[in-house]
């Protein structure tokens, strides 16, 4: 089992703010000291531009950078040569939309998304649909807050060229049946794109076992730094896709008449890379590996169950999403006649950090019949006592407004 109290000692933010109850890990995770130190060490001792120089320091930087790629790919069960570094999951999905979608989608095609998607997995496809004329179909959710698989089996038919969906919802906490959805897509010849931003740091992920054609993730949600993430994609897709951006390192040869492209994944990595971010993320996944992803999942799932039990006992409080074994550490809730911003503001006065708003999921809020919500989300450093503080804080909100 994961000892969250001991783990919490590895995160300097809690030294700086000893009374902080941080319940916004879905927005971004805190960073362990090991990640911060590794990034500092790289900048202090190995600072050179990877892939550019043949002198010793540049070679060391290149080796460290590519080792980071191998470590992160291995953590997610993938071939390092199929990992394209991006800034985050958002950029990874945009890469697929522009490089694959712009080449392969047209007026006769259908793209299937779900109403539970983060805006990052909706807006890129909407923009492209206006340009290419394809249709977007959105899969609904059930009353319990799960993806409607009966509707999925009805909708994902020949004519569908792409299915893109979240591995885990950033609002409902539900883990979608990824393998089943991918199999449905592949039966019709569609490719399957998985937004793994909320899953990669919270449960075991093996992209090859899942069968995903593309898998997007963000480092800052995985105990790593901002500005680094990635796209894992099947090699044949990467080989067939045109470049997403032009510039240095993504080329093989440039003349005044044109250019040829580097091998994948460098073909999609134009410009000087975020090498220090890659080093930080590789250190983060090493940290998660030592904890054990099954342990991470069980810890956060248990906290979610405990939180739901406590919140469901409070008058006027409504929680969203299923009460089940496939529920991760994300709890969205509302309080009758209290704006979520007021909830978050009053909790902040008590040192409790939660998010309030639409969480970049306005269509899902509309499907739930609410404009916004408050959200508590957990990480490896979250304690049961943090949940108790949340419940106590909500009781104070209730005393003021009800």
Image (cartoon, rainbow, N blue to C red):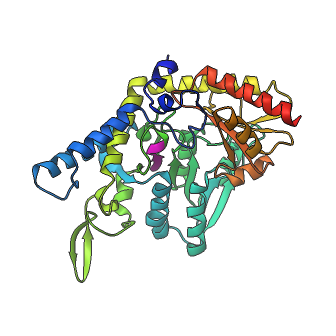
* On screen, residue 364 above or below 384: below
Q: Main secondary structure of the magenta part?
A: strand
**Foreground pick, 89 / 190:** 89
Q: What's the residue at 76%, 27% (across, down)?
A: 311
**Foreground pick, 238 / 319:** 319
Q: What's the residue at 35%, 49% (across, down)?
A: 83
On screen, residue 81 versus residue 298, left or right, reads: left
Which percent across, then down, holds residue 371? 77, 51
Q: Quadrant of residue 285?
A: top left
Q: Is residue 172 magenta?
A: no
- The quadrant of the rendering that contains the C terminus is top right
- Total marks placed: 0
On screen, residue 353 versus residue 370, left or right, reads: left
Most extreme residue toward the right is 402
* On screen, residue 43 above or below 323: below
Which percent across, then down, holds residue 256? 23, 83
Q: Is residue 278 visible?
A: yes
Most extreme residue toward the bottom is 257
On screen, residue 275 versus residue 52, left or right, reads: right
Q: Is residue 73 visible?
A: no
**Foreground pick, 227 / 71:** 227
Q: Is residue 219 magenta?
A: yes
Q: What's the residue at 71%, 40% (across, down)?
A: 344
Q: Quadrant of residue 27?
A: top right
Which percent across, then down, holds residue 35? 37, 36
Magenta span = 213-220
Which percent across, then down, holds residue 238? 36, 58
On screen, residue 354 versus residue 273, left or right, reads: right
């Amino acid at each position: 089992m994961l000892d969250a109290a001991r783990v919490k000692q590895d995160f300097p933010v809690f030294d700086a703010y000893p009374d902080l109850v941080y319940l916004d890990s879905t927005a971004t995770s805190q960073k362990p000291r090991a990640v911060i130190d590794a990034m500092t060490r790289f900048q202090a001792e190995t600072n050179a531009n990877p892939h550019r120089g043949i002198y010793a320091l540049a070679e060391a930087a290149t080796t460290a950078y590519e080792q980071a790629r191998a470590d992160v790919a291995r953590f997610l069960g993938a071939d390092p040569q199929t990992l394209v570094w991006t800034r985050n999951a958002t950029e990874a999905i945009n890469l697929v939309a522009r490089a694959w979608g712009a080449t392969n989608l047209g007026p006769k095609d259908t793209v299937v998304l779900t109403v539970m998607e983060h805006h990052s997995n909706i807006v890129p496809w909407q923009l492209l649909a206006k340009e290419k004329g394809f249709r977007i179909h959105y899969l609904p959710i059930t009353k319990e807050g799960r993806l409607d698989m009966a509707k999925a089996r009805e909708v994902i038919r020949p004519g569908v060229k792409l299915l893109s969906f979240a591995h885990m919802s950033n609002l409902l906490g539900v883990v979608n049946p990824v393998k089943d959805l991918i199999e449905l897509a592949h039966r019709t010849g569609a490719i399957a794109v998985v937004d793994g931003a909320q899953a990669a740091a919270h449960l075991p992920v093996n992209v090859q076992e899942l069968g995903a054609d593309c898998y997007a993730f963000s480092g800052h949600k995985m105990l790593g730094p901002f500005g680094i993430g990635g796209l894992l994609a099947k090699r044949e897709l990467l080989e067939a896709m045109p470049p997403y951006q032009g510039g240095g390192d993504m080329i093989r040869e440039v003349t005044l008449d044109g250019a040829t492209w580097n091998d994948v994944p460098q073909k999609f990595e134009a410009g000087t890379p975020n090498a220090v971010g890659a080093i930080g993320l590789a250190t983060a996944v090493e940290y998660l590996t030592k904890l054990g992803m099954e342990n991470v999942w069980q810890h956060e799932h248990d906290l979610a169950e405990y939180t739901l039990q406590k919140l469901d006992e409070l008058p006027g409080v409504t929680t969203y999403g299923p009460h089940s074994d496939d529920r991760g550490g994300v709890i969205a809730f509302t309080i009758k006649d209290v704006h979520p911003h007021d909830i978050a503001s009053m909790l902040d006065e008590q040192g409790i950090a939660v998010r309030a708003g639409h969480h970049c999921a306005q269509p899902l809020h509309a499907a739930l019949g609410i404009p916004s919500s408050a959200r508590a989300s957990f990480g490896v450093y979250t304690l049961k006592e943090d949940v108790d503080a949340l419940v106590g804080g909500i009781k104070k909100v209730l005393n003021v407004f009800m």
